[in-house]
Amino acid sequence: MAYSEVEEVDGYVGNFKVKVRKKARYVREEDCNSCAECAEVCPVVVPDEFQMGLSSRKAVYLPFPQAVPASYIIDMEACLGTNPIACGKCEEACEKVCIDYDMKDEIFELEVGVVVVATGMDVYDPTELDEYCYTRYDNVITSMEFERLICAGGATEGHFVRPSDRDVPQRIAFIQCVGSRNNAGDKGNRYCSNICCMNTVKDTLLLRDHYPDCECTVFYVDIRAFGKGFEDLYMRSREEGVKYIRGLPGEIRQDPETKNLFLTAENTLTGEVREYEFDAVVLSVGVIPRRDSALVKKLLSLSTTGDGFYMEAHPKLKPVDTPTRGVYICGCSESPKDVKDSVTQASAAAARAMTILNAGHVTVEAITAAIDPALCTGCGLCAKVCPFNAVEVDKEKKTAWVVSAMCMGCGNCGATCNQGAVTMGHFTDDQYYAQIDALLDEDAADKVFTFACNWCSYAGADNAGISRIQYPASPRLVRTMCSARVTEDFVLYAFVKGAPVVLVSGCHFADCHYIDANRQTVKRVYRLWDKLEKLGIRPERLQLEWISAAEGQKFARVMRGLEEMRQQVTAEEVEHTKKVLAEEWEKKLAREAKRKKKAEADESRDEVQVS
Amino acid sequence: MSQETKFKCLKCGHEYVEKYAPDDDIERACPKCHSNSVRPEKPKKADVAEKK
Ligand SMILES: [Zn+2]
């Protein structure tokens, strides 16, 4: 469905319901044969966005030469229409009677089993980089604009002319890493955009092919030519006489008369600083996530990495899966990549999608949540914190239930429910209490009690181990799927059992495998710090750390710090904590028992009524 | 709304001021020791009263 937008996505793997708005084209696509007679008579001229504004189009237009379907569209914001001033020239010119000014958007409801996100990317806007004067000097253009100029189907039919005087430039500079690899992070992005080096190498070869006399100079930081055949292409460019200077220009100056550009740069290989004169400068701009990527993120409950691209479920083992079951990602929506890598990844995403569709059923790991209707009060707190919208609540019937196919088993709902109504498969409360008992029954004072999430901090501990990094022997780890599974009661119980220090650890914010579940961890730890302080217990004894799977060093450093902290906790302090919290714990148990008794009573009453 | 808030590192004791709102999505770390155990100070009752 071309010229359409997804507005809503409901449901779950195998049962997605997708609402799509097919926008009105005002030209019947089934009849239009793109004869262009409508455009010829259209009196409205506007900049052509596909040609980066370097040429114009009419209000009735073909979006780009290879558009599918090959049907014209009327840009209603630009069109004079038939009201209030009658134009209607396209309608008169169209022999096939395709024009329909009254066409309306159509809404389609689709039922689909899986969703593949291939929404692509946007390019970096270099306006904010004052040193390159992109908006001040006509002859400073971006690599995208260069593409539209050198392309046979482009604004100048493949003639590369400079915007100021439409002359063919003889001396052309390319500046690499514009908006990429900026470690200061103030302007542009920290990451490498992956495609710009080879794009420039290709552009220099195109220029040398079109204009054998032109001089090309590339200012670069590193040339990253790591793909198949890429090094050969780079060498060919050098052999063709393209100059490569290692160092980025600090400023660009323009001669007001000739509009020629002067670049000052240091060649970092020779240490030479000098000024170079060029007729045109091409800024090799980086790739950024689509500007509307947050919309799709919300629609499909996706997560993004720190740079804003969609995050895969696992970087090595599930590179096209997302945290939401049945949703796959590929291409530049996942990270900057070239056509070949995009095709490879898209094939993988399609294959993953077909695997589920062909199987006809989904196997869910037995770690999902279940809600006991007898204990549930229908408060809806669990639904509020579920990152996957897997909990449905019936406020009238005062109950909630989990859609297993949507639940990924993070346990956030289990930690949030204050009625004890949620049971996490294989990660039940009782199992955690049993683990705490087992680890702290003996010599609790010698141990640093640690909750570690499955994906990152537990793996970080593994990393420390396999890297043979030395750390104290005091840590005792309990694994949770997500740090958001750690209830306030688990932490308090560890203190009741005599833990001198407790650590809650999880994934870094950008790496959370359950979209944003670990933000709840922070809120819980903040509440616990307040509670401990109120009870006269030093909040410092509860620590919070984000440790990634690759941070074995950090895991060891944290553990060394906690061991020092453990040694400073006195036996009297531990005893005081146990005493204070034991009273609290008794009250909690009494509350729970009362609640269970009431639930049982309610249940048996219901049974009597039924019979 | 973000507000200048005093944070205390529960690892090294370092205190610093940073913009904070209960729902902001920022991974915080102590600027001195890089620990993530940083605790925002609750606005004092007097401050809240002043705002009202
Ligand atoms: Zn610190």
Image (cartoon, rainbow, N blue to C red):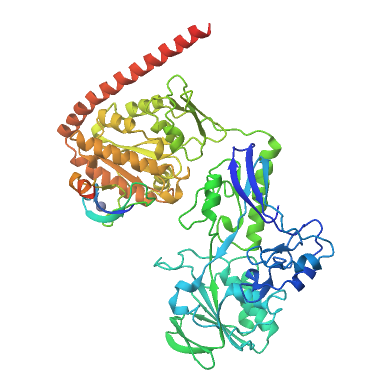
Q: A438 or A515, which lies in front?
A: A515
Q: Position of residue A457 (x, y in %)?
A: 40, 44
Instruction: Count all numbered tags in the image, as a single digit.
Output: 0
Left or right of A247? Residue A207 is right
Q: Looking at this rendering, what residue extends furthest in the left direction? A: A572
Question: Which residue shows up at 61% across the image and 38% down it?
Answer: A13
Q: A41 or A197, which lies in front?
A: A41
Question: Which residue shows up at 65% across the image and 78% down it?
Answer: A149
Q: A20 or A409, which lies in front?
A: A20
Q: Position of residue B35 (x, y in %)?
A: 30, 50
Question: Which residue shows up at 52% across the image and 9% down it?
Answer: A610
Left or right of A603? Residue A574 is left
Q: A187 or A299, which lies in front?
A: A299
Left or right of A195? Residue A417 is left
Q: Is residue A79 above or below residue A405?
A: below
Left or right of A81? Residue A199 is left
Quarter location, residue A503: top left
Quarter location, residue A278: bottom right
Q: Is residue A315 visible?
A: no
Q: Is residue A350 above or below residue A43?
A: above
Q: Is residue A120 above or below residue A515?
A: below
Q: Is residue A99 visible?
A: yes
Q: Position of residue A250 (x, y in %)?
A: 43, 81
Q: Position of residue A221 (x, y in %)?
A: 48, 74
